[in-house]
Amino acid sequence: MAATIFMSTGESSGDLHGAKLAAALIRQRPDCRVVGMGGCAMREAGVEIIIDNAEMGVVGLWEVVAHGAAIWRAYRRMKAWLIRHRPEVVVLIDYPEFHFQIARLAKRLGLRVVYYIAPQIWAWRSGRLRTLARLADQMIVILPFERVLYQSVGVPCEFVGHPLLDDITTAPERSTIRARWGLSPVQPVVGLFPGSRRAEVQRHLPLMLAAAERLHRDRPEITFVLGRAPSIPGEDIERALGGTVVPVTVRRGESSAVLAAADAVMVASGTITLQAALLRTPMVIIYKVAPLTWLVARWLVRVPFAGLPNLIAGEAVVPELLQHQATPDAIAGLLAQWLADPGQLELIRKRLAGVRDRVGEPGGSVRAATVILRCVDQWAAPASEAA
């Protein structure tokens, strides 16, 4: 009998990773049914979306409370579906606060759990390592140092490489993108990536636009291109752009192309920073959260960096401007300095090349699908033998 695989993602980046995983599952096992919570990317990949994750992409203590009703509705609908349909495996992708509860529910129902793209337990709340050891039947991780952590507490764990590597191998050349978009092959291009959650965009985009205004004042030849995540409504961006004098071109769902075309970018901390690193695009990482969230994070977080490129490299290969440090003058100052000195940009690109060497090889989504299907077959075997 064909397997039913339940897959859950809670935000835009998870939706993209889930889509690649679902496509790989369906290619390897065309008769399998993939159902779950996700967004447009997973739907296009062939997933039967029973819960849209549009309202789930929140971060921070206050933000989660404010979206509590939507999160609770998603939990109840997911619980009802799992009880009724009892899939062969529940695949949870990142989004730990919600997915830990789903994992507990699945275990109570006697369902098998695969956790793909593990929470950053090495960054904060390391006690979750043993929690996952109780809840997950199989871990699939995308950063090489994570495998040792999970194996240390007896969780079966496979390192498959970061799924973003597949995008990088097919990324267009800078000259190709600039020609397609009608951009100068020699004048500077600066990218803006305010985030994939609405709250992130509300905090970061005005800050980035203010930095762009400072750059534009001194160097009006700079072209600004904003990478809009598919999860962000166009009216949110248009509203913010209506208050700036700087011409900004918006590209929806074309993050790789914007990164390839840009000389440098200002970017909210998140998965996009690793995508920029893999394309060797110099970046200024910024991040702002609610004051309460910031105070709690300073107490709990145990790593020296916020950005994935710096965490993977173990050093500050690109600058981070967090909370009160993230000001228009600070962002514009760094970018202006780089754009005035191509040698600095090249030095940063060389440092970012070292990050690329640490995250494995392309094909991570295919390898993850292989692990999941192998687990499904192994877990089904005892029941078949008993019958």
Image: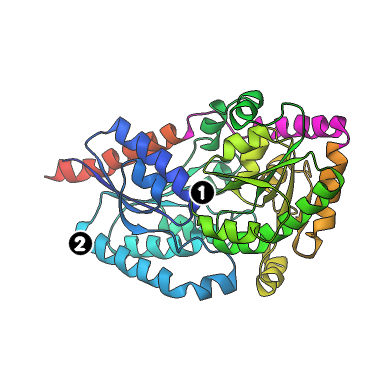
Taking the magenta stretch, the answer to whether it contains residue 348 is yes
Q: Residue at x 16, y 42 (%)?
A: 384
Q: Is residue 129 above or below residue 215?
A: below
Q: Is residue 171 left or right of residue 287?
A: left
Q: Amino acid at mark 1?
A: Ser
Rendered location of residue 278, percent (x, y): 64, 34
| Residue 289 figure quarter | bottom right
Q: Position of residue 16 (x, y in %)?
A: 46, 44
* Residue that mark 2 sits on: 84
Of the numbered discs 2 and 1, the one sitting upstream in the chain is 1
Residue 191 position by quadrant: top right
Task: Give the residue at x 52% y 45%.
Answer: 151
Q: For the magenta stretch, what is the residue range? A: 340-364
Categorize mark 2 by other alpha carbons within 10 Å: few (<14), some (14-19), many (20+). Answer: few
Q: Which residue is mark 1?
A: 13
Q: Secondary structure at mark 1?
A: helix
Q: Which secondary structure lies at badge 2?
A: helix
Q: Quadrant of residue 301?
A: bottom right
Answer whether residue 217 is visible to the viewer in this image. yes
- Nearer to me, 318 or 136: 318
Left or right: 137 as drawn, with respect to 244: left
* Quadrant of the rendering where the N terminus is positioned: top left
